Amino acid sequence: MEIISFMKFLKKSKEFGILRVMGNNKSAGFEEVSHTADLEIRVWAKDLESLFRQSAAGMVHLSGVEELMEGISSVKQTISLEAMDYEGLLILFLEELLYRLTEDYMIYDIKKLSITSDYALKANLKGSQIKSYQRDIKAVTYHNLNISTTADGYEVHIVFDI
């Protein structure tokens, strides 16, 4: 089953809470975790590419994107990132998307995503303009960030500074 795009996600989901982005398939998804001062999600997936996609979907969900701008054409872009480990690569990826969300009011479908064993990422993105978002996420943090392997793939907890 393919991951629901951010745009379809916004149209189908007006309720916020625990969501599994891939419907009934429990192999990938995210859920909000209670955190005392910041926002936190737990993300799980069968492979690293899916983990990064679900992490991005979770961050967009937490920001509370309300609706897309009507009549605005989409923008296609490619990003390339390199880091010293997968955790650093995840932070760079989410920070790049967060910057585009908060500064440009854009959210992106991740059309193609590849991650190499030498901690490089390349993503083809298709962006759409949004009207607003509810929560101002200041940063993606390294607090307790550890991508771990599980029997079903990968899991990570991500804390966002608000």
Image: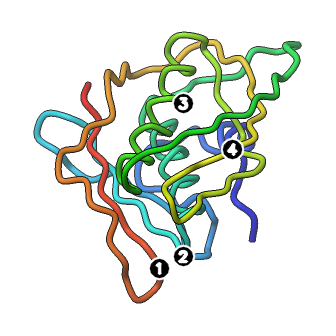
Query: How many neighbours does mark 1 have within 10 angstroms: few (below 14), some (14-19), or many (20 or more)?
Result: some
- In terms of secondary structure, where does tag 3 sit? helix
- In terms of secondary structure, where does tag 4 sit? strand
- In terms of secondary structure, where does tag 1 sit? strand
Please give the name of the residue rendered at 72% of the width and 47% of the height, measured from the top-left corner. Answer: 5
Q: Which residue is mark 2?
A: 46
Q: Which residue is mark 1?
A: 153
How far apart, in angstroms, are the residues tagged by discs 3 and 4? 11 Å
How far apart, in angstroms, are the residues tagged by discs 1 and 3? 24 Å
Horizontally, residue 42 falls left or right of residue 90, namely: left
Give the amino acid type for the residue marked by disc 2 in the picture: Lys
Q: Which residue is mark 4?
A: 123
Q: Which residue is mark 3?
A: 97
Query: How many neighbours does mark 2 have within 10 angstroms: few (below 14), some (14-19), or many (20 or more)?
Result: some
Give the amino acid type for the residue marked by disc 1 in the picture: Gly
How far apart, in angstroms, are the residues tagged by discs 1 and 4? 21 Å
Q: Quadrant of residue 66?
A: top right
CB within 8 Å, label 1 to label 3: no
